[in-house]
Amino acid sequence: MKKILVFLLTAIFVFPQAGKDLKYLLWERETEFRKSGASFSNVHQIINILSRKGARKFSVLSFIYDPATTGLKILYVKLRKKSGKEISLDLSRAKDLPMPAGIIFWNRRHKVIEAKGISPGDILDIKYRTWGFRIAYLENSQEEKEIVPPLRGHFYEIVYLSSRYPIKLMRYKLWGPSDVQLSYEVFNGTLRVSKMIKDNIAYFTWEKKDIKPFKYEPMMPSFSDVAEKIIVTSLHQWKVKSKWFFNISEPSLKPDKNIRELVQELLKGTKDNEKKIFILTHWVAQNIRYLGLWLGPNEGYTPNPAPFTLRARAGVCKDKAALLVSMLRMAGFPAFQVMTEAGSRVENIVADQFNHSVTAIKLNSKKRKFRLLDPTWAPQSRELWSSREQLQYYLVGTPEGEKLMETPPFPAEKNYLRVRLKGKISGNVLSGEILINTDNHYGTLFRRKINISPLSMRNSIFYRLVNDISPFSRINGIKKENTFNFSKPFMAKIKFRIPYYLRGNLMFSPLSSFPPRIFNEFLKVSPAERKNPIRLANTRKIIMEEKISLPKGLYVVRLPKNIKANCKEASFKANFWKKGRTIGAKYVFMNNSKIIKDIKGFKNVIKALRNAQVSLYILNTGGK
């Protein structure tokens, strides 16, 4: 379930400025494909080094590959000095090393070679060869031979025509048997393409000149959603891929005695189907650690056998989803394994664009409706299907074959966060309580922050929130729901006391200090001009209300001004009021879309939000 891309990378993490430190004179990929779906590629790069920073970037060259699916051979690395002298690097000095691994141990490797003596004005000429396929993991192969992909006959390739650095000429050449029908499409741009057939071989060439550096922007959609790219594929129906995924996953879904007994124990006495689904999904989510283990040839595109995942208490998304499928089937639900793409769009062209796996329950056979469950996301969350995964494409593996589908949008009102502050002023002291109610998105954030913290620090998030109001804040008590009880929304009540809160005749609206903590994602939006939409983590609705009682002899001279701003995808308003000896405020923010296209309007909303951070009540004494 993991896309394997072979890139030229560097081991030194410096970030040259686009166009000032280096420039690609040529970026060329030549690929031969075969009827089996296997492919052989030569990649040729010529780089003009323009500064010392650019030279440092290429002082160590790293070529990443996976020996189970891809072979890789460095053909040459040449350095053409500014003086005209040409130096060929000794390839026998290249080291073949394991890639660093954190929680997924899947045998990825890289060939590393040091390129000494690079100076500004030099030209680096690199050529390497790869062979294999770009999905899954099969036999180890260091010899150049045909490595057939799991879905035999399915060739596909995704080539990006965008880079952090300028490219003078980018060329992609592709050839193979003319009787293999290819589909291809260019996304997010245009470029010249030519095609010819000679001696039963079809030749394709895509070419583009003078490509400007790709400009990364804060909170933009994923690179693959906005970068110019070519997708080429020999598969034309999603149903074919759906059937293949069902057939290749099915052997791993068979339950054993341990799975049967576990399901019986977990569901003992439970009659309600919704409760059964809730119990099984959360058991897998909470009890199977996310850890990628290497089990041999099929690792990466087929799930590990469900009984093994249960015994190991570990697996990645595909393994957790498979175990849940097996357990749901034991409970009588028609469950299936699913491929999906978390965080990026799947283009409607049949290529492997999936990076995640989840579980589906068939709801209606005739209408082909499914309910999705994600045990990888569900740890420490009430959500069985994350609201962050709205508008996400997925493909269910079934024996009949399914079309590519998309999850529905998630209503902002269901991703709610309500904060209510009720307090009173006595002298210059503000005391009272804060009530927090939330579910789904923010409920998950609170639960995870609390549950994964050491016992001594599980209330630290509340201390930080109250400390945002004033550094003199003191908490006198915290009451909250059991955060491991996923049957109820999250609730917390905080009793507080803040001395020295009045500053002469000025008092900040207490909740106006919360935005940096709660609205941190939005406050990252820069006022600078941008090209791409803004991509938020989720839809949501945030309501913050405060009500403060004033003592006798203290009255309001002026309330803060009401604030209001909205655009197509978001809105914010702040209203302030007084009634007798009570003053108050209500802040409401809502974004009804994850993707913000009305950039100008959204920046006005964020500006209004920032203005609300300095909301001041002006008070005075005088016996009223």
Image: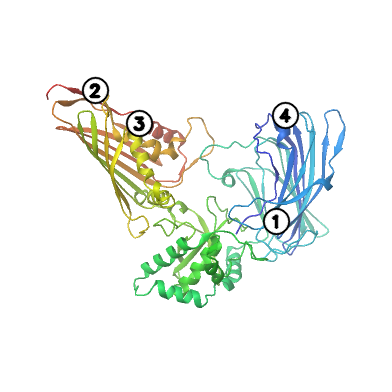
Q: Secondary structure at mark 2?
A: loop
Query: First in sequence: mark 4 or mark 1?
Result: 4
x and y, in percent, of residue 434 in the image? 27, 42
Residue furthest left in the image: 623
Residue furthest bottom in the image: 257
Query: Residue 66, labelled with which disc?
Result: 1
Toward which corner of the image does residue 143 lie, by quadrant? bottom right
Left or right: residue 451 versus residue 350 is: left
Q: CA distance from mark 4 to mark 1?
A: 32 Å
Q: Residues within 10 Å of mark 3 (few under 14, many from 20)?
A: some
The kind of residue on which mark 1 rests is Asp
Q: CA distance from mark 4 to mark 2?
A: 58 Å
The kind of residue on which mark 3 rests is Gln
x and y, in percent, of residue 432 in the image? 23, 39
User: Could you tell me if the residues under marks 1 and 2 are in contact, i.e. CB atoms within 8 Å?
Assistant: no
User: Could you tell me if the residues under marks 1 and 3 are in contact, i.e. CB atoms within 8 Å?
Assistant: no
Which residue shows up at 33% across the image and 34% down it? 469
Toward which corner of the image does residue 12 lie, by quadrant? top right
Which residue shows up at 34% across the image and 71% down it? 272
Q: Residues within 10 Å of mark 2 (few under 14, many from 20)?
A: some
x and y, in percent, of residue 91 in the image? 83, 46
Residue furthest front in the image: 456
The answer to whether residue 331 shows anywhere in this view is no
- Mark 4 = which residue? 52
- Mark 2 = which residue? 505
Q: Secondary structure at mark 4?
A: helix
Which residue shows up at 34% across the image and 60% down it? 487
- Mark 3 = which residue? 613
The answer to whether residue 434 shows anywhere in this view is yes
Foreground disc of the pair 1, 2: 2
